[in-house]
Image (cartoon, rainbow, N blue to C red):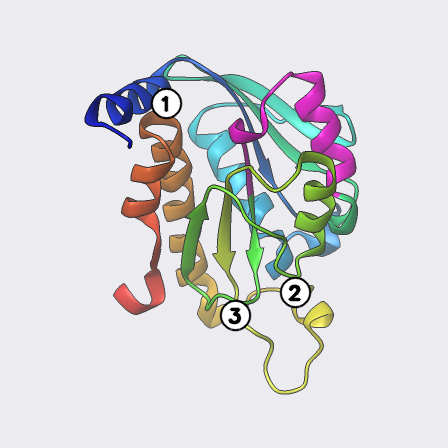
Amino acid sequence: MVTAADREAAATADRLPQKFLIVGLGNPGRRYQKNRHNIGFMVLDRLAAAWQIELNRVQQKAIVGDGRFQDHTLILAKPQTFMNLSGDSVGPLARYYRIPAQNVLVIYDELDLPLGTIRLRGQGGAGGHNGMRSIIQHLGDDFPRLRLGIGRPPGRMPPAAYVLQNFDKEEQLLVAEIIEEAAQAVTTFLTDGLDLAMSRHNQNLAATG
């Protein structure tokens, strides 16, 4: 049985200085920059700006920057492999920096969640997302991930075409809110642990806004 002392010990461990790899998924290049598939990159850029971390070098097939936040050592990464091969970058980065899977947080788009939905969880499958499938092949499935809903394509549009579209003009305000809330979710994850981050930030902004 898990006791109150066990829970307190786990919470204390969450707050001790650690090393984290924070990954945003997307496709490299200007033509994909504002695509639905690239919302992971957008959040990663927001975090880099907030924490004043320069993404200024290429390492293990990713654009990488490192810095500190509340005594944690952070590695921020945007894989440049194209989405379907993201694990070819994330796996080697985690091994190079000796970061355990539970400290690798991956941020990515999710077709099966409505636009505006934020879901942070500690493990799981790929759910049809090829980038996550690639990462799971390298890390296993026991690592935290932040899923950002982009909704299903309209009509009979193929999902592969939908994710490579830019967000519509009328979606831009909500997308900005999603990026800010996602950045806050990552911050809470680092400062207070996964459970509190899930309880505080898992929500549908479109429903509550």
Q: Which residue is mark 3?
A: 151
Which label sits on residue 163? 2
On the image, which quarter does residue 185 sit in?
Answer: top left
Three-letter residue code for mark 2: Val
Up-down relation of residue 63 to residue 180 (above or below): above
Gap in angstroms between the C-alphas marked 3 and 1? 33 Å
Stretch of the chain drawn in magenta: 86-106
Q: Position of residue 183 (x, y in %)?
A: 42, 40
Magenta span dominant secondary structure: helix
Q: Please report the residue visible at 66 percent of the width from the left and 51 percent of the height from the top.
A: 33
Residue furthest out toward the left: 4
Residue 13 visible in the shown view: yes
Residue 28 percent location from the top left of the image: 74, 45
User: Sequence order check: which comes first, mark 2 or mark 3?
Assistant: 3
Q: Quadrant of the N terminus?
A: top left
- Name which of mark 3 and mark 1 comes first in the sequence: 1
